[in-house]
Amino acid sequence: MSEQRLAHSELLKLKRWNTPTIYNGWEAITKHDITQGFNMEETRDYMPQMGAMIGYAVTVQIEPSNSSHPKTNPNAWNEYREYVAGIPGPKIVVVQDLDAPRVIGAFWGEVNSNIHRALGCIGTITDGGIRDVEEMTNAGFKALARRLCVGHAYSAPVRWNCEVEVFGCAVKPGQLIHADKHGFITIPKEDEMRLLEAARFMDDNECETLIPAARGSSGKPALELLQAIDHAAGQFGIQVKRKYGNSGEW
């Protein structure tokens, strides 16, 4: 990825929604499989108070149980940091722990999060462990991880700028990612430009059709309630189909 594809203002607007809302918008516009592209396994957001994060993926693999890696390439950290520094931000560091689901050592802690924050990274998604949660939070560095960990063991970059798999989801370098306490979603490049408008449309459509129908029919007989919801669902689907040609059911 040689340049940022969305304006910073667009990223800020996308950040205002939660990740399920981003998924709803993406679902309406994409030609990709809507059962793929997001975490298949449970993630844990260790800084939910920071809200959602959105950025472009930089990728790295680690294997904290293997003591040979630091010896094999003693310059790995410098080479990896040069790679991270060369990518426009905002960036989310996606770390595949080759020891997973075991957690032997943490790639993330106070020092590494501050270094990456200085390099334009806003957070991480790792299927390994993290430590120094308060210190990472103070650095403004958000983390979705498998669990906490005491030590770092032999945590060092093994491979980077490569496709990785975390929590059952493949992530390519440069992919746009939206993440929060629900998990994360990766956006194909061809869907990026329409994502903001689609998320806004789907959110407005829900607020103007399905939700009013449900709330407005509260307390009415069950049959009348179900008819109102069914009618609203039909209107919702019609609006989406008119806008995006999506034939899905709601």
Image: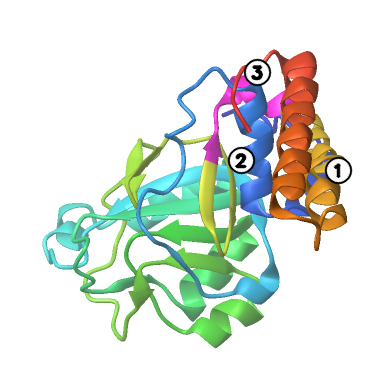
Q: Which of 44 and 124 is in front in this view?
A: 44
Compared with residue 30, is residue 91 higher up or lower down, i.e. above or below?
below
The spot of residue 61 in percent (x, y) is 30, 51
User: According to the image, label 3 marks what residue?
Assistant: 246
Measured from the top left, where is residue 104 in percent x and y? 20, 73
For the record, the magenta segment spans: 186-194
Q: Is mark 2 on a helix, strand or loop?
A: helix
**Residue 187 higher or lower than 51, as above or below:** above
Q: What residue is rendered at 65% in x and 56% in y?
A: 53
Q: Which residue is drawn at 41% across and 66% down?
A: 145
Q: How is the image coloured?
A: rainbow
The nearer-to-camera label among 2 and 3 is 3
Q: Does the stretch in magenta take in 14?
A: no
Compared with 159, 7 (above or below) is above
Between marks 2 and 3, how big is the CA–CA gap?
Answer: 14 Å
Residue 191 part of the magenta-drawn span:
yes
Q: Name the residue under label 2.
A: 23
Mark 1 in CB contact with mark 2 (< 8 angstroms): no
Question: Who comes first in sequence, dot 3 or dot 1?
Answer: 1
- Please, what secondary structure does the residue beneath circle 3 have? loop
How many discs mark residues in the rendered view? 3
Kind of residue indicated by mark 2: Tyr
Mark 1: few, some, or many residues within 10 Å (few <14, many ≥20)?
few
Residue drawn where x is 83% and y is 57% of the image: 215
188 lies left or right of 18:
left
Circle 1: residue type: Ser
In the figure, residue 177 lies in which quadrant?
top right
Q: Where is mark 1, residue-wise? A: 9
* Mark 3 nearby-residue class (10 Å; few <14, some 14–19, many ≥20): some
